[in-house]
Image (tube, rainbow, N blue to C red):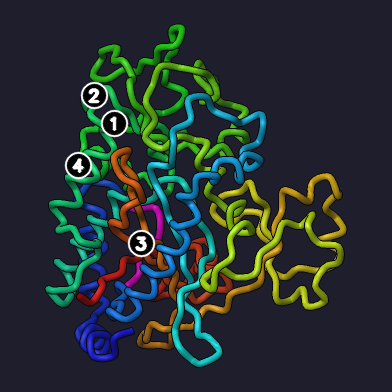
Amino acid sequence: MIPSVRKRYNTLFSEENYNRFLTDLNRSHNFAIKFRIAETPVFVPHSFKEKLTRAADSIVDFLVRDDFKKLTEKAIPKDLFVPQETGHTLFLALDFAIVKDERGELQPRLIEMQGFPSLFGFQDFLADQYRKHFDIPPDFSSHFGLSPEEYREQLKKTLLGGYPAENVVLLEIDPFEQNTAIDFIITQHLTGIAPVHLGDVRREGKKLFYQRDGKKIAIERIYNRVIFDELLKRNDLKLQFNLLEDVDVSWAGHPNWFFRISKYTMPLMSSPYIPECKFLDEFTSFPPDLENYVLKPLFSFSGTGIVFHVSPADLAAIPEGERENFILQRKVHYEPVIEAPDGRVKVEIRLLFLWDDDQQRPQLVTNLARLSRGEMIGVKFNKDKTWVGGSVCFFEP
């Protein structure tokens, strides 16, 4: 996106160096990363950084409304409501496609939003590795208003919430089997918070415990990474604690916010940065140009269940009583903006926020980028392709 920086990067790029980069990524924490890492970071000019932050601010304005909880009370399935909900989310992720508007200018368009943590640990590590192995302008930053050291301290403070590290757990289902396992390992390295399998948590009344180094340790705070979508499919799990029980813990990312800030929220907002989007049950008649829309189930994760080529039959197959659980969203056409050696590549930028209790608004702290040549952005849609996968943005000052 910055021609001079891109040209220099591509000129100096070599497969040998890229392979050394991957080897270093996998060896640094003695763990093989389970998803593809792109050959390049994204270099974002100052002008587009300003567009991204303006777009994010307009969305945050809606999230901080006094009536936000009332507006989203139906977002949480009744049988998945978790007690002791916090006043606001601790984490926020906003996914923006890079598109070209009718005037030919690049603009951000919101694709997804999550009140759930993302790769806060890994992205900092990945940026450092790109700097180590490739030519990155020294004054460009992957963080917002924070040095890498300040960012790590802020992340540690937010996750621990004032509790001793041994009494905080990163809770997940089979954490080291997840695609995001490398983030859990790095988070433990940065904060001392151990990844713990949900099935290994023990409950005694309203108290929770886990085993660490052969000792029974009280759990006082949960850094939650469990997605209900996956939990509901795991009939094989034997649990003493299922997330829905009222227990004496502090939440680093309360589960209810996964539902409140999600695809459910997008039809409630009006912004030039958000594509046309409506709940399926709000249509009296469906658009005739269905080829320009995508159908999304509200309660799914990581692209599952999305119908990219919508037909009248797809819509007719959804019973009227279930249509409130789907949205029809106008397609966004990603503009390929990354010049790779063998063609252009699409980009999606995820802005990552932390929202501590003493803050009026969430704080933009870092980012994640995903590169794609496929119809959709996710890694699973870009198999056997190059210059695609997980990456990070470096922003021009």
Does the image show residue 174?
no
Nearer-N-terminus badge (3/2): 2
Q: Say whether marks 3 and 1 touch (CB < 8 Å).
A: no
Numbered disc 1: secondary structure: strand
Q: Where is residue 236 in the image (x, y as percent from the top left)?
A: 59, 26
Q: Which of marks 1 and 2 is in front?
A: 2
Task: Tell whether position 315 is magenta.
Answer: no
The residue at which mark 1 appears reads as 194
**Which span of residues is magenta-colored?**
32-39
| Quadrant showing the N terminus | bottom left
Disc number for residue 368:
3
The Cα atoms of the two marked residues, 4 and 1, are separated by 11 Å
Name the side, left or right, on which 242 lies relative to 289.
left
Q: Mark 4 points at which residue?
A: 190
Identify which amino acid the numbered label 3 is placed on: Leu
Q: Residue at x 47, y 33 (%)?
A: 173
The local crowd at label 1, few if under 14, some if 14 to 19, many if 20 or more residues have their Cα within 10 Å, is many
Which of these two is toward me, 125 or 296? 296
Which is nearer the N-term, disc 3 or disc 4? 4
Along the line of sight, the residue nearer the viewer: 126 or 39: 126
Q: Position of residue 34 (x, y in %)?
A: 39, 53
* Residue type pointed to by label 4: Leu
Question: Mark 2 sits on what residue?
Answer: 166
Q: Are marks 3 and 4 in contact (CB under 8 Å)?
A: no
Residue 184 - label: none
Q: Distance between the residues labelled 4 and 2?
A: 13 Å
- N-terminal-most mark, 1 or 2: 2
Disc 3 to disc 4, how far (Cα)?
18 Å
Are the two marked residues, 1 and 2, in contact with CB atoms closer than 8 angstroms? yes
Residue type beneath disc 1: Ala
